[in-house]
Image: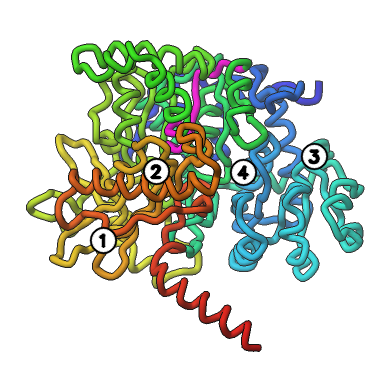
Amino acid sequence: MKNKQPKHMEIMSYKKCLSIKRKDGLRMRCVDEFTMNSLLRCTVSRNFKRPFMSVYGEDEVITYGKFNYIIQNIRAFLVSKGIEKGDRVAILGESSPNWMIAYFSITTIGAIAVPILPEFSKSEVNKILTHSQAKSIIVNSKQYEKVKDYCLENPSLIVRLDDLFHIPEKILKDINNKKNFVDAAGIDIKVYKRRAKENVALNEIKVEEEDIASIIYTSGTTGTSKGVMLTHKNLVWNADISSDAYVKIRPRDKFLSILPVAHVYEFTEGQLLMMMNGAQIIFLGRPPAPSILLPALNKIKPQILLSVPLLMEKVYRSAVVPTINKNKTLQKFMKNPLTRNAVCRLVGSRLKVKFGGRVKFFGLGGAPLDKEVEDFLYRAKFPYAIGYGLTETSPLVAACGAKKSDHKKGYIGKFVKHVDWKLLNKDPKTGVGEIAVKGPGVMKGYYKNDDLNKEVFTKDGYFITGDLGSVEKKRLALKGRSKTMILGSGGENIYPEAIESIFNNQEFVEETLVVPEGTSLVALIKIDYDSFAKITKLSFEDSKDAAIEYINKLKRDINKELNSFSKIHEVTLQEEPFQRTPTQKIKRFLYLDRKKKDKKTSENENNDSND
């Protein structure tokens, strides 16, 4: 068999890895150096014949050995086409085994992968390609339209991600749509025959820990995108330390991948972490709508899942709350502090069954978890874990494990070992300050942005996260983003996320956004019209009027709970879903200064009518 285990590949046992302590104080658990090359070599040597990757609903299962075989061929192909150490190669496409094959093929020859989130617009994609000066693009058919113009204007090495076929430039010129790209003839680089000179060139490549592995362009809530330079050490160290500190992953464990691998949270804590421990990764292969996700969970029965809190919050409101509300006995016991835990454990056991029945680690990150939802999960002894981090920190900064004893409600968890931290401009009364960190996971900087790099790093080398938090007994509590914090008329600090959480826990409320308007606070509220109309038994138009009355009542009730400077002055029905980043955070900047925008729109409409 072509992809048999190479004789020269030394089998690095996990036990041996656990003994590797470095001069810099770091410990290596699953690798012998913090590079993608080491990760690939060590895990393939241990798990060569084990199943590694597949897509839900498809028959093909790629073993660790086959994964490595394909990568070695594609590495040789890229080198033969002139891709050198430090060159940028973009990857644009939905999560798949081929995406990961492409990534390791790029980074193990010393080139730099530029993962692009599929949700980015054509304009954003072209800005990224231009800014990064991508020498090659690996793109799937669904996304080809976004890169077509760039490819024609900047002759590049193009690989079709769907099947890992190289599409020659002469063929590319005649392609003008998605269908043509799908059907275009190409060269199968998965079985590229390596020549002696390419093997020599590959052997001469030395990838160092401090070499850049990825430039990841963020999709922030501020509307600006920055290229985050992450090294091999940043990413591999972050995954390696997680494998020891938060979850014990066994080679027979299954991980259902539902988040975009182009996002560092899924890439590091999902893909790399599973890979270095020999687990099996199954890609969902489509958006995680309940109608698709629930059957997949039932069939796969994964031990490990990663998600953004929004998914768990939706499950809580659609499955947990109705289960309790429709049973008067459960309602009664839920209100009693003495029996509340028992109700949560009962309903929680049913929730575990919905997730396949074998989940031992459900990681939640990328955004704060709603307090009411967390309280339920905690009481139910559901195996959830919370992590905090950013793209710039590869990502993990602080976290807790999935055991109940690891948790303290209201807190993320302890800072990751070897992460040094401090709070800047700390408020002496509240203990809240801006979180700044330093450690092996912190980025090298923003690509081609020296001015911004000077702003985000302190003189003594700490990265300023932009998040506000407090620390008690080494546990981190998040308060919100420093940029979203609202300054009250009397100089008070108002955290909109805390107010939004209260509104979001009310019946029929899907999402809330609190924004300043002058010296007042306005809450934009999106409600579930279908559920509201069913309960009120009103027509759509009548239910809209009733909904306005309902949210005004909510405002009055909630204002009684808020301090004087945090009270909501006005509530507005949000008709359309909030626009979000790919990690499901609301793009707040789009909803600021509403009246100014409304006035500008009105003026434009008047001008149009006068033309």
Contact between marks 1 and 4 (CB within 8 A): the answer is no
Q: Secondary structure at mark 2?
A: loop
Tag 2: amino acid: Ala
Q: Is residue 141 above or below residue 343?
A: below
Q: Marks 4 and 3, how far apart in space?
A: 20 Å
Q: Secondary structure at mark 1?
A: strand
Q: Nearer the viewer, residue 599 or 121?
A: 599
The mark lying in front, picked from 2 and 4, is: 2
Q: Where does label 2 land, which residue?
A: 367
Q: Where does label 4 land, which residue?
A: 108
Q: Where does label 1 land, which residue?
A: 486
The magenta stretch is 300-313
Tag 3: amino acid: Asp
**Dot 1 or dot 4, earlier in sequence:** 4
Q: Marks 2 and 4, how far apart in space?
A: 32 Å
Q: Marks 2 and 3, how far apart in space?
A: 34 Å
Q: Marks 3 and 1, how far apart in space?
A: 49 Å
**Dot 4 or dot 3, earlier in sequence:** 4
**Is residue 481 on the magenta stretch?**
no
Quadrant hosting residue 177: bottom right
Residue positioned 50% across, 55% down in the render = 218
At which x and y percent is residue 223? 48, 63
Tag 4: amino acid: Thr
**Is residue 304 on the magenta stretch?**
yes
Q: Is residue 401 left or right of residue 264?
A: left
| Pointer 1 local density, CA inside 10 Å: few below 14, some 14–19, many at least 20 | many
At which x and y percent is residue 241? 39, 32
The mark lying in front, picked from 3 and 1, is: 1
